[in-house]
Image (tube, helix red, strand yellow):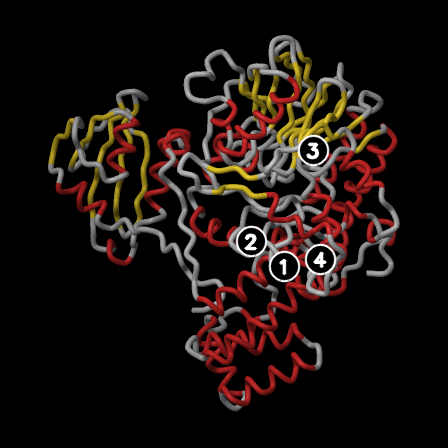
Amino acid sequence: MTALPFEDTRDFENADRGFIGALVPAVVKDADGRTVWDNDAYGFLKDECPDTANPSLWRQAQLASKQGLYEVTEGVYQVRGLDLSNMTLVEGERGVIVIDPLISAETAAAALALYREHRGDRPVTGLIYTHSHGDHFGGARGVLPRGTEEGVPILAPVGFLEHAVSENVYAGNAMTRRAVFMYGDRLPKAPDGQIGAGLGMTTSTGSITLIPPTVDITRTRQEETVDGVRIVFQLTPGTEAPAEMNFLFPDQRALCLAENATHNMHNILTLRGAVVRDSRIWSRYLDEAIDLFDGRYDVAFASHHWPTWGHDNVVTFLSEQRDLYAYMHDQTLRMLNDGLTGPEIAEEMKLPPALENSWHTRGYYGSLSHNVKAIYQRYLGWFDGNVAHLWEHPPVELAQRYVDVMGGPEQTLTKARGYADSGDLRFAATLLNHLVFADPGDADAKQTLAGVYDKLGHGAENGPWRNFYLNSAMELRHGENAALLDTANPEMAMALTTEMLLDSIAVRIDGPRAWDEDLTVDLVLTDEGHRHRLTLHNGALTHRVVADPRTPAGVTLTLTKPQLLGVLAGKGLDGVATTGDPALLAGLFSYVTKPDPGFPIVTP
């Protein structure tokens, strides 16, 4: 860590530049008085870095915790430190355009109120979603309450809606569970606890909302004018999100980089889970941005962290970010083709010195280790080519056999403590993990493993790694803290296409229980003009649109999409016209399981 240029304070100067005013206190509550955001909890970061934190991550947390309204350039403002992400506001002829309204409606409303306190009560005259992740659209109703969105253009990259909602449906419960560990919002905010997530501090816990886009950005160089403000777009699909875009405000000479270039190494595969991203195309879109917008901006800002001022400084910043993702991709492929596996490549990989010593390429959010494994996964999948790994026992059965081979629980615990005492925390964690999986009731093993996780977390430079380690230690000591997926939000549900709604049911069918069923249900949606035929056969629920049903279904429901949502939510068939045997519908739903909110990550 001594090699890093801690004497370089330019990031602190940039993070403070343009400061106008802060929210005091920096606490946001919901309508019931529950705290959904508390940036004041990070006041301890003003102190020197303790032994319980990596100095580089502590520095990043000091920067990311800065809170308030900032001027980026004339007519362009940011609210930072009121959620994981930033809200950017661009003043137009009649009002203000909001870019990325944070995660929660409550934090978004607080951010807009802070802007209006200092810049006047301008109406929201445009809304832009840079990409399809929840921290960039969830607070939409905080800036456009119901009934106020009429006539307000809402811009997003093509494919936004599909990706925004599908990520929260198909694997949403598993992702939510992992996100609790990744962002550490339930950990105590303290020098030995949660000190940030690298990309920001943590996630707010308010109401997630979604207003569908009204204007799709479908091509690079597409130009739109919103409230008199000209905007030139660059589509960047498959980079940090499946649907994402950069864009230029030519009259303000300001470039928005969405989440494609932030002041950290980003994730090729986030620890909460997602589709593996394409680091090759990510690098190419950054290179395209350098060329496409050359000479047309004086400042670049993103939806996280602080801006970069000066055209040449931005080019340097983008060039190093470009080279970072290209280097990781190309060197992983080089070593992959030399026969190394993902973990071997991750252990072997080293960044060039110029990137290694640049603050904005450090692994605060993504890490070199797990990004390299993700690139390997993208090309070769989970199997490393070693046939011994092709059909291994699952974790519990494997752990029981390892413990037996090592001479039993007592000997395994003694050996693990020896490795921990000698400083080999990685292997101590491996041994102790086997011991805990072999016997989840072994309190000594759990406590010892928790202590190892504490040490690994306190030494981690990567924010999500630290939070994962410390959350795991907390769960080993105090038991599971279930994370429920909030599927009750009606706007998220209405944003799903009917096909996606039916897919969400299909992935919850208890296949073995339904093996012997053979039933057909038709849904005639009067507001869409489509008939969807659902078939449960061999434990699989499939569906298709049928134009002319020559073979009648066992039961037919004629209804609207809102009524369908009610049926799926278990509200019955009131107002729904049915023909055939309604018992078949009940039979179908009898096989639909509810997701387990507390599936294990740490213990079986």
Q: Are marks 1 and 4 in contact (CB under 8 Å)?
A: no
Quarter of the view holding residue 121: top right
Q: What label does residue 241 carry, if any? A: none
* Alpha carbons under labels 3 and 1: distance apart: 24 Å
Q: What label does residue 466 carry, if any? A: 1
Q: Are marks 2 and 1 in contact (CB under 8 Å)?
A: yes
What amino acid is found at the position of numbered circle 3 in the picture?
A: Ala
Residue 112, given in percent of the width and then of the height, sits at 57, 25
What amino acid is found at the position of numbered circle 4 in the picture?
A: Glu
What amino acid is found at the position of numbered circle 1 in the picture?
A: Arg
Q: Are marks 3 and 1 in contact (CB under 8 Å)?
A: no
Query: How crowded is the residue under tag 2: few (<14 C-alpha within 10 Å), some, or many (20+)?
Result: many
Q: What label does residue 461 carry, if any? A: 4
Residue 560, given in percent of the width and then of the height, sits at 27, 25
Query: How crowded is the residue under tag 4: few (<14 C-alpha within 10 Å), some, or many (20+)?
Result: many
Residue occupying image coordinates x 68% and y 13%: 230
User: Which residue has dot 3 on it?
Assistant: 302
- Tell me which numbered mark, 3 or 1, is placed earlier along the sequence: 3
* Whether residue 264 is situated above or below residue 372 in the rendered picture: above
Q: Is residue 403 left or right of residue 521?
A: right
Residue occupying image coordinates x 67% and y 81%: 421
Q: What label does residue 184 carry, if any? A: 2
- Tell me which numbered mark, 1 or 4, is placed earlier along the sequence: 4
- Tell me which numbered mark, 4 or 2, is placed earlier along the sequence: 2
